[in-house]
Structures are given as structure tokens and as C-alpha cells.
Image (cartoon, helix red, strand yellow):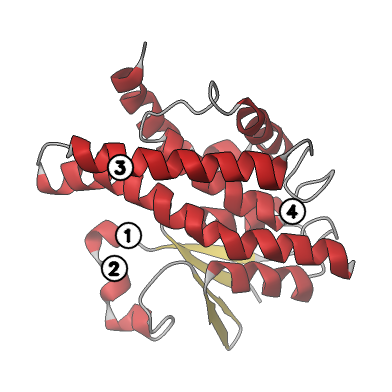
Amino acid sequence: MSVKVYYDILSQPSRAVLLFCRANKKFIPFTPKPIALRKFENKSEEYAQINPMKKVPAIVDGNFKLSESVAILMYLSDKYNVPGHWYLKDLDRRAKVDEFMSWQHIAHFNFTKLFNYEVILPSVTGSKTDQGKVSSAVVEVEKTLTNLEQIFLKDKLYLCGSDVSIADLFGVCEVEHVTATGHDITEAHPLIGAWVERVRQKLNPDFDEVHSVMHKLRDKNKTKYAK
């Protein structure tokens, strides 16, 4: 029976879940179920039967329903016996994955705030970008990127070791949210830029396909910050 995956491509956690399922399609039979947040499809009573919180992502696996992206990837990793590098079996190494996933909610908040100020609100309301709010958000994003680079990534190939894990999926999907606003992080954070490219190459063509909308936004907005 196929796992139904409910997502919106503009949601970082949604992209992490979708990318994981695509990368592990040999192990996880799944059916994509896009939910357009911009059309408020997540607010429907039908979707509320799947996720009462009316947020994405969510999955339905047979009669089992589950929301919250971190819980979803933990569940899928264990149930479908995906390759061990995704969610490490060794307790100490798995705990480091859990540590990052507990922290990444900070990144999600800060990166989402900048994305909303620069992309979503001007598009939805037609108003001018509030540069004061953008500048304040950029400061918090830079602090978060520095922590990601200096505390978690450091000199490793991937966030939790020598191979990609679900921690990398959450991290890279957050960073792609920042680049979609037009900000180039590679000059100030070269280790992050190199890590993103490693994850991209490891997971392509799925990586580029899942992030196609974000990359279009990046290409459209990057001229704002061209030197």
C-alpha cells in the first residue's frame, strides 16, 4: 500500500519529507498529494481529517496518520528500513541527528521570517518590502547560518558525519529558503555553500526537481543583491 504524502513545495519541512521519499522510492512506495497553501486547501474539512492542525506536511500510511516532519522522517526511516545512513542506528550518532533536528526549528523560524518579508508578503499584498524588518531578519539569519556552519557542520562532509542523513535534508531545505530571497550565502559561508552542493549532487535529479520553484525564485530575486 502506498504512503500518501501531503505537502506544499513552498514549505521547507514539506520539501524535506518529499525529497526523502523520492530518494528512497525503492524502499517507500508513496503517492504525492500536493496541498496548495496559497489556495487554503489545508483549511478544508477534508484535509482536517488527515491533519487536525491543518498544516503540511502529513502522511497517511494505510490507516495510520501522522503529521510533523521530524516525526514523519523518523517513522518512515524505521518502518521501511531505509539505508542506515539516513537515521543512524548507533545511539550516540543518532542522538547527534536528533540534536540537530531539535535545533533546526530555530533556523526554520528565522529563515521563514525573512522569506515571508521578502517574497510572500509583497506578492500577496502588493505592498513594498519593509526594509527595516528585512534588515532585522537578515541579522538573525546570519547568526543562524554561523551556528549551522561553525557548530554543526564544521569540518565534516555532512552535518552528522561522512554520509547524508535526515538532518541534512532539514538543514539544506532551510538554506534553500534563504537563497530563494536572492541572498547569496556562499561568500560569507563557504562551508555551507560546499555542503549544499554535496547534498545536491548526492540526491540529484530529485534535489533540483523538488527545489525547482525555489531556484526560480532565487534566479528572479538574486539581481536585487548583485554587486
Q: Closest to the observer: 25 or 149?
A: 149
Label placed on residue 136: 3
Name the residue beneath numbered marker 4. 165
Tag 2: residue type? Glu
Foreground label between 4 and 3: 3
Q: Position of residue 122 (x, y in %)?
A: 17, 41
**In the figure, 11 relative to 202: above or below?**
below
Please give left or right for residue 162 compared with residue 48 in the image.
right
Residue 196: x %, y % from top left: 63, 35
- For residue 7, say whether it is visible: yes
Element on which disc 3 rests: helix
| Among the two numbered marks 4 and 3 on one chain, the one whose residue lies closer to the N terminus | 3
Find disc 1 in the rendering and name its residue.
36
Q: Residue at x 29, y 36 (%)?
A: 135
* 193 sits to left or right of 144: right
Identified by mark 3, the residue type is Ser
- Label 4 and label 2: CA atoms lie apart by 31 Å
Helix, strand or loop at label 1? It is: loop
**Labels 1 and 2 touching (C-beta < 8 A):** yes
Verify CB contact (< 8 Å) between mark 4 and mark 2: no
Residues 104 and 48: in front is: 104
- Bin the neighbour count of mark 1 within 10 Å (Cα to Cα): few under 14, some 14-19, many 20 and up: some
Q: In this rendering, which labeled residue sits more in front, label 3 or label 2?
A: 3
Q: Percent from the top left, x then y, of residue 106?
A: 49, 58
Mark 3–mark 2 distance (CA, rounded to whole Å) = 32 Å
| Marks 1 & 3, CB-CB < 8 Å contact | no
Q: Residue at x 76, y 76 (%)?
A: 79
Query: Of the residues under marks 3 and 2, which one precedes in the sequence?
Result: 2
- Asked which quadrant contains residue 25, the reply is bottom right
Please tell me whether mark 2 sits on a helix, a strand or a loop.
helix
* Residue for badge 2: 41
* Residue name at image x 71 percent, y 42 percent: 153
